[in-house]
Image (tube, rainbow, N blue to C red):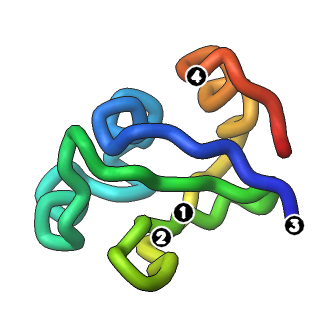
Amino acid sequence: MQFIEMSGKALRRVVSDDELHPHELDRLGVTSECVVRINRQGDIELRRPDRWDPIGGLLGEFEERIKRETGLDWV
């Protein structure tokens, strides 16, 4: 599976309220410094000390939003 990793801060800039509301991101433990990854299907996973936790997903044309924000491609 391919992912793009980014910080929680970058995720907050690309996610829209109809995908994950900022209060929901707070509740899930997404901080500015945390690491998240998104797969090609739009699933978001949060890095925990011993695992990746699925926390939600992106909708629509998320691929361009992610690439524009991070400057990265799928790996």
Q: Say few, some or many: other residues with alpha carbon within 10 Å of mark 2 (under 14 / 14 to 19 / 20 or more).
A: some
Q: Where is residue 24 in the image (x, y as percent from the top left)?
A: 20, 65
Q: Which of 7 and 13 is in front in this view?
A: 7
Picture residue at 42% right of the left edge, 84% below the top: 50
Real-space Cα separation, disc 2 to disc 4, in angstroms = 19 Å
| Above or below 9: residue 26 | below
Q: Earlier in the sequence, mark 2 or mark 3?
A: 3
Quadrant in which the C terminus is drawn = top right
Q: Where is residue 11 in the image (x, y as percent from the top left)?
A: 41, 40
Q: Mark 3 points at which residue?
A: 1
Q: Name the residue under label 1.
A: 44
Q: Earlier in the sequence, mark 1 or mark 4?
A: 1
Circle number at residue 70? 4
**Badges 2 and 1: C-beta atoms under 8 Å apart?**
yes
Disc 1 vs disc 3: which is toward the camera? Answer: 3
Amino acid type, residue under disc 4 in the picture = Thr
Quarter residue 42 falls in: bottom right
Circle number at residue 56? 2
